[in-house]
Image (cartoon, rainbow, N blue to C red):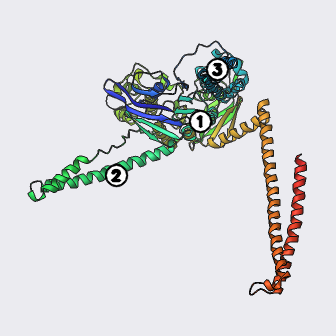
Amino acid sequence: MYSVNDLLVEFPGRILFDRIGFVINARDRIGLVGRNGAGKSTLMKILAGIDRSYSGSVAFPKDKTVGYLIQERSFTSSKTVYEEAETAFEELHRLNAESEKVTATMLASTDYESVEYTKLSERLHEITERLNMMGGSHYGEAIEKVLKGLGFERNDMFKPMSEFSGGWQMRVELAKLLLSRPDLLLLDEPTNHLDIESIQWLESYLQGYPGAVILVSHDRVLLDNVTSRTIEVQQGRLYDYPAAYSDYIELRMQRIELQNAELKNQQKEIAQIEAFVERFRYKASKAKQVQSRVKMLQKFDDIGIDSTDNSRMVFRFSPARESGKIVVEAKNVAKSYGEKKVINPFDFIIARNERIALVGQNGQGKTTLLKMIVGDIPFDGELKLGHNALLGYFAQNQTEKLDRNLTVFETLEQIADSDTRPKLRNILGSFLFGGEDIEKKVSVLSGGEKTRLALAKMLLQPINFLVLDEPTNHLDMAAKDVLKNALLHFNGTLIIVSHDRDFLSGLTTKIFEFRENKIRQIDDSISELMDRRKNEELQNNIKNNQSSEEKELSVNKLQYLENKEREKVRRKLEKNVAETEKNIDEKEKLIANIESLLENPDSLPNGENIENLTATYKKYKDELDTCLHVWEEQQNELNLFLSDSD
């Protein structure tokens, strides 16, 4: 168990955490949520031991490990991907060495009752537990499994790290963290550099993770499927909910409604008491009652209302003229960089009002195809935009294209025409830039603020054909919901690249799937596509990718299930025989009693006669014969089963 008590973090003019506290249990799955700037990353760094600028206590058991995924870092490794991932097992190698040393010391000892021997035994147990959690000697298979899950092909694993982009190198960092299996796993936006399939794999991995997990993410589906507890950080306070994200939203609203109702009732009661005091304050006959009510007023506790930040981006696309029926027509389009083919020859047509999601692993050519469509890069083949197609393009690096030296207001003013210039302050206000914010330089804006500004800039011109490459990067969930709602009401054609399953759900009508250097057009929803891919992966693993150990485990499991089933059958057969034998005993006792009565008719009970007794005797004899016949069959069946088992 990990505990945080009385944590205080303050900056000049602002308290980030106002003496908060909470407990983390060994298998907790916690989603850490809050608006950008609320302090989520700071809290993660405090838990990781990186940030110590606080008062209060952070108490972790000394034998437990903490792992933290750092988002911003530079890469200088000269190792291959596999070798870099293997560095995650430095602790395993150290523990193996210590295990051998402790074992040797114990073998050399002769005093098995000593305190020293007991301590060595306890330490060896701790080491063994930790080694088992880390996978023991099978780490090679674990490395390949995790790297593959995060999108690396087997031949990629033995290439130098330097050949990969920063995003792919971040995947290796994530792989190292997962492979090291810390007791407390801290993940701050782990899906930033992952595609949908890798996110789905990570989700499954975290569900079965043996330690505790704290997760910061703007991926609602990931939070819902992984976490079972949500901690909200807001305006210096902490709220703990025993639920995943979507349920937390409901519980939070219920809590605020309850607080508001309690506050309303309290204020009503206070008003009534104050009215009584004011009315009878100067009447001697009511002095005692007045004094009693004054004391009642002093006993009321303040009812705190969870503060809610209701500021929301307002996003509506400007109306535009309708395009022609065909928005994009492409024939035999292809793209290569030198000898490397990124997109093989491909034909497609995009019709008016179609909504297309481009999905697939990073590096398969999704962004390349978007750049070809908008004319940013040369390519082979023919591609043309249809009649009256008014293009709006949000690039993956759109925020980097903003002029860092301009202010927020100047960024829009630079491209505004005479009609939109008077509306600039209102437009910026709709994107949460109010007051002095509009005079901020672009260089000081956060990632989320830059994304909102880039979206606002795109709004200034009428658009009927939207091409969006990762538009939700750096947006919090509230802003993503607003953007999605605007896109749902967008009266035009949409092509979008996104790895956010919740964002894409219900937004698109067609998928271009990039897989194994091919592009397939399919009519599945995102969830249907992911379910199919998951099933395919499962079948492939069963059919082709089981290691010898996994096969042995499968055989052992099958044998175990067979033995379990045989044991179940054996018990049932034996139970049937025992029950029939019991029935035979009961029938024989009844028959013996009747025979005794028939031998001595004078002892018959009142109302009983020889005829009735004889009929009952015959009935029991017939039932006994039947039981004996059934027992014989059951016993033969049991003997046959036992002989087969031998």
Q: Quadrant of residue 287?
A: bottom left
* Vertical position of residue 506 compared to residue 189: above or below: below
Residue type marked 3 = Leu
Circle 3 sits in a helix, a strand or a loop, which is it? helix
Residue type marked 2 = Ala
Between disc 2 and disc 1, whose residue precedes?
2
**Which residue is more in the foreground, 245 or 586?**
586
Judging by the rendered image, the residue that carries numbered circle 2 is 261
Judging by the rendered image, the residue that carries numbered circle 1 is 386
Between disc 1 and disc 3, whose residue precedes?
3
Judging by the rendered image, the residue that carries numbered circle 3 is 95
Q: Is residue 49 visible?
A: yes
Where is residue 199? Give x, y as percent: 61, 33
Q: CA distance from mark 1 to mark 3?
A: 65 Å
Q: Residues within 10 Å of mark 2 (few under 14, many from 20)?
A: few
Q: CA distance from mark 3 to mark 2?
A: 57 Å
Q: Residues within 10 Å of mark 1 (few under 14, many from 20)?
A: some
* Vertical position of residue 465 compared to residue 585: above or below: above
Q: Is residue 490 visible?
A: no
In the shown orientation, is residue 133 left or right of residue 485? Answer: right
Q: Quadrant of residue 96?
A: top right
Residue type marked 1 = Gly
- Quadrant of the rendering where the C terminus is positioned: top right
Between disc 3 and disc 2, whose residue precedes?
3
Circle on res. 505: none
